[in-house]
Amino acid sequence: MEISHSTRSGQNKSNEDRYRIREEKAGTVIVLADGMGGRSNGATAAAIVSDIICDYNWIFSNIQVSCNDAFAQADKAIAKKSEELRAKMGCAVGCLVIVKNTIFYSGLGDIRLYAQTKTGKQLLMSKDDVLTGKNGQTYLTRSIRGRGLRYPISVITLSTKDILTCSLCTDGYYNNDQNDDATIIEIQFK
C-alpha cells in the first residue's frame, strides 16, 4: 500500500483542512477533517478532530465501536474548546481504517471517499450529509461541532480485492473550487 496526498489553500486564506495518518502493524488509520466555513477557528477544530481520532486507541477487531467512541471523544473536545474560546466551531470529518484486506470508512459532513476498481470504474462510496439552500449554499446536516452526535455512525466496508486506489477528499477538491481549500489523500493498493 502506498499513501500520497496533495493540498492547497483557497484564495486569500490559510488552509483549514487537516489530515493525519497512522500506520501500525495491526492497521492504518487515515483522518481528513475540513474546518467549517462560516464558523470561527475552523483550522483549530480540524486539527483537534484529526488528532483525537487518529490517536484514539483503535480496536482493529471492532471498527464500529472504535469509530463511535473516537468520534464522540472528538466531539467532546470540540465542545470543550468552543467553551474555552467562546466560539462556535466544527468540521466535517472522514476516517479510513485499513485492516489487512479490508477498508472501513466513516464520515460526517461532506468528506468523500472514491474508489477506483481494477477495471477502471470510479465509484463514489460515501454519502454527503448536506442540504442545499435556495441560494445554492450547502449546509452540513451532520458534523463534529461539540453538540453531541447522532448514533450509530455508519461504517462502510470494502474489500481491497477489486480496488486499485481509494481517494479521500474535501469538497474544495471534488467541486474543483479554486476559492476553497482542497485536500486529497490517495491510497494505492498493490
Image (spheres, rainbow, N blue to C red):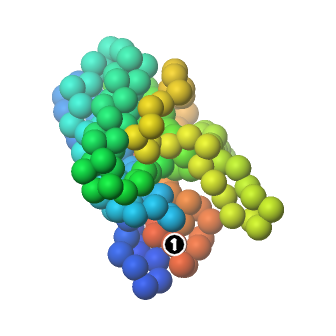
Task: Look at the image and tell me in which quarter the N terminus lies.
Answer: top left
SS class, disc 1: loop
Percent across and percent down for residue 29 are 31, 37
Q: Quadrant of the C terminus?
A: top left
Residue at image coords 45%, 37%: 147
Image vertical order of residue 79 relative to residue 169, above or below: above
**Label 1 crowd (10 A; few <14 / some 14-19 / many >=20):** many
Would residue 156 be seen by someone viewing this image from the given angle?
yes
Q: Nearer the viewer, residue 100 or 183?
A: 183
- Quarter of the image for residue 56 reads top left
**Hey, what amino acid is under mark 1?**
Asp
Depth check, front residue: 143 or 61: 143
Residue bearing the label numbered 1: 180
Looking at this view, name the residue that lies furthest to the bottom: 12
Image coordinates for residue 64, horizontal then vertical, percent: 43, 19
Q: Residue at x 77, y 67 (%)?
A: 135
Q: Is residue 168 visible?
A: no
Please state the horizontal and vertical placement of residue 24, each as a whole percent of the image: 19, 33
| 12 left or right of 18 in image | right
Residue 26: give x, y in percent of width and height: 23, 24
Residue 98, quarter of picture: top left
Residue at point 55% right, 33% down?
Answer: 162
